[in-house]
Amino acid sequence: MDSRVESRQPEAAVFAAAAHELKSPLALVQHIAQTLADTQTPLSEIERAQYLARLQFTSDRMLRLVQQLAISYRLQADEQLAFAFATEPLNAVEVCEGVAHELEPFARAYNQHIEIASQRGQLVVANREILHDIIANLIDNAIRHNPTGGSVRLTSGTHGNVVRLGVHDQGAGVGQAELRSLRHTLGAQPQPLGGRSATSGLGLYIVGQFAAAMGGNLGLGRPEQGSHFFVDLLRSKQMSLL
């Protein structure tokens, strides 16, 4: 195969995944906008507020994805860019709490809730904005594949020189054969999951890229139910005062 064709394959996969991920929220935004603009559709103040809230977090999600795609493209185009991210010791759980609070309205819209089962004080070497996007993508992924009334559980723990941040959902799990295949490609290219046909794998691809840019990696656990994705990041040697 022509090497030029091979080099375009990951890029083409990302563009195809981006189109897939943006299609549904754009259609939803269009539907909500038409509903709110239709004077013949009777809406109570509560219903109107719900529509506006849905419009807000859907547009926020699309904007976040577009911004992440811009960073992802730059990382793909220049591997040395990874070293340009300014890192610092960060309280990982504190960042998780902030993202969970930010995405709580999104979870409530799907009749779900977010739990944090972690203790503060675990410091990682990371870029705050990049870490925020990693956690946001993992929570977003979990919410969209969770059953109605389900919960998203955030965990953290130390494993030697790394801190492992995990997000566990109760949605469709990943089969053993797919798990073995996914372990070799997770975060390296967008890849839809068999049990989660609505996903393109773009969010996980971006998480893998961002984690690698900070010296970490994206992994997949093997829970009894649902799915458990985690990110291992370098543990800071600085003592936490929290």
Image (spheres, helix red, strand yellow):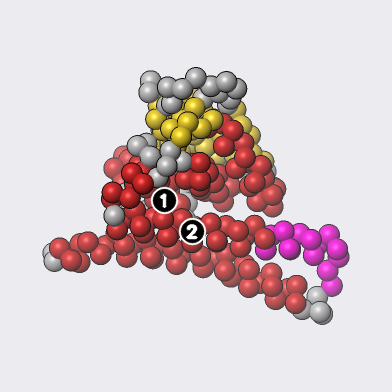
Circle 1 residues within 10 Å: few <14, some 14–19, many ≥20: many
Residue drawn at x 63%, y 68% is 29
Q: Indicate whether 56 appears above or below 221.
A: below
Q: CA distance from mark 1 to mark 2?
A: 11 Å
State the predominant SS element of the stretch in magenta: helix
Amino acid identity at mark 1: Ile
**Dividing the picture into quarters, in which one does residue 178 lie?**
top left
The part of the image, by quadrant, that contains residue 48 is bottom right
Name the element at disc 1.
helix
Q: What stretch of residues is rendered in magenta?
A: 42-55
Residue 53 spot, x, y in % from top left: 72, 59
Residue position for label 2: 67
Residue type highlighted by circle 2: Gln
Q: Identify whether 123 is placed above or below 74.
A: above
Q: Is residue 117 visible?
A: yes
Q: Which mark is residue 206?
A: 1
